[in-house]
Amino acid sequence: MTTDNILYTEEPMDGTSADLAGGWGELMRPRYLVSTITLCLGVALFAFNEFFISTALPTAVEELGGASLLSWAFTLYLVFAIIGGLVAANLKRRFGARNTLLAAAVIFIAGTILATVATDMSEVLAGRLLQGAGEGVVAALCYALIPELFPSRLVPKVFGAEAIVWAMAAFSGPLVAGGLTEHFSWRAAFFVSIPAAAIFIILVLAIVPRGVSGVGKPPVIPFVRLAAAGAGILMISLSGIAGGPVAMTILLVGAAVVLGTVVRFDRGSFNPLLPRAAFTGGKALGTGLWVILLMPLSQAAGSVFLVYSLQHLWQLGPTAAGALSAVMAISWSLTAIGVASVRSLALRNRIMLTGPVMLMVGLAAVLVAIGTGTLWLVVPGQALIGAGFGVSWGTLSQLMMDVSDDAERDRTSAMLPTLQSAGYAIGAAFFGLVGNVMGFGAAASTETMRFAMLVVFASACVVAALAVFFAMRTARLAHAGTKI
């Protein structure tokens, strides 16, 4: 792969190279069109599969039985997707991006076929495990390949295109999966990912060069640290289905200890899974990764509880509640496209700082809506939450690549989608614990439920405030030229 596309120094932090910014039409030129389609399709596999499966699984459980295993279909997928993301950079260096992507796509297809033809829930679970492992690697490497396949002036446009993919998945995914499940079978909703994965394999063969990234002896896969990280994520996921607040607390505290230990040992390893500066307070990369983790963590409060709150506090139907929930995705996509069109890198960096603030204000608006019963406040709240991600996510992701040196860039890029998934998982578990402690449950009265949701969204505002703090510190460190 050429090195001129990897260098990010062509756009200095002061924004003097604003005129070098590329337009949307450049992504459609022959040189970049196939690369754009390939990376967007890799993201689409992850996004659409998530909505297809979540929509079709309840019907599969009705046919196959094993309702008690339903949550495991999501838990195993998430755990192995995160593990796949963590090991993706090591696999890329050892086997090359092309071979790793092909193998991961084949694993994903194998898992999808197994889940599609399953005769009981245990086979569905095995398929979901393989899907997660394959998609975790694919998603991570699609991020890692962005600075290798595109010049830095086009990176914001790539993130904008991927935001469009997520929005399409959020809207059409449940609709398509619901139609396939209702008119054909839940197996059809599972199967539809296979042709897309096959096309992805063909595109990888066309655009990703042969060869292995890096020099020297290929790294040994750190299985012990991977297993420990997987155990920590599994503990977080299991806390969501634990028998009570005490068990949930024990699992979450245990997960924090395990994951903290993994990060500590990984930092001193000669073969790390994470960038060396990950989660440190004195490097732009370290504080920026905190933002990447904390923003989805805080937004998980809405992902878990908003639709339920709309239905039970305001007695909205599923369609209306789902529409209000989708405002966030619309806002994310529109603002991401707008920010990606800004030519000045310096201006994009300044706009980025408003993202966590908008997220915090949006969560506060939802909090006030719940406390006062003012339904209309949910709309601007959701719009601000989505805009917070839209104005900051692509630029922040590019900044994380910018402040990484060549040796660390693969690990940093692969960390971005992995850390996003981890943030949602931790947030879902944490806010689930907060809600349960505050009395949330099917038998809770309306006032008890309202109080529980007030505490949940107030906690989310606190987490978002932490993201604001780390975002400001990241900007200062990046401006000072601090690198890992």
Image: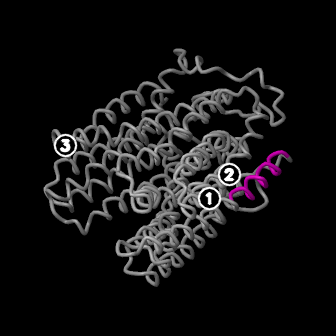
Name the kind of residue labelled 2 in the image. Pro
Name the kind of residue labelled 1 in the image. Leu
In the rendered image, the quadrant that contains the N terminus is: top right
Q: Which residue is mark 1?
A: 294
Q: Which one is closest to the eye, mark 1 or mark 3?
A: 3
Q: Residues within 10 Å of mark 1 (few under 14, many from 20)?
A: many
Q: Confirm whether the magenta stretch covers residue 474.
A: yes
Name above or below for residue 257 compared with residue 49. Answer: below
Magenta highlight range: 467-479
User: What whole-number distance in Å separates the C-alpha atoms at marks 1 and 3?
Assistant: 37 Å
**Residue sitting at 31 percent across and 45 percent down?**
52
**Residue sitting at 70 percent across and 28 percent down?**
342
Is 414 on the left or on the right of 3, as rendered?
A: left
Mark 2 / mark 1, whichever is N-terminal: 1
Q: Nearer the viewer, residue 37 or 219?
A: 37
Tag 3 and tag 2, C-beta contact below 8 Å: no
Q: Position of residue 142 (x, y in %)?
A: 50, 39
Tag 2 and tag 1, C-beta contact below 8 Å: yes
Q: Nearer the viewer, residue 390 or 225?
A: 390
User: What whole-number distance in Å separates the C-alpha atoms at marks 3 and 2?
Assistant: 40 Å
Q: Which residue is mark 3?
A: 182
Q: Position of residue 356 (x, y in %)?
A: 68, 51
Q: Toward which corner of the image does residue 364 lie, by quadrant?
A: bottom right
Q: Which residue is mark 2?
A: 356
Q: How is the image coloured?
A: one colour
Tag 1 and tag 3, C-beta contact below 8 Å: no
Question: Element at badge 3?
Answer: helix
Q: Residues within 10 Å of mark 3 (few under 14, many from 20)?
A: some
Q: Position of residue 465 (x, y in %)?
A: 70, 60
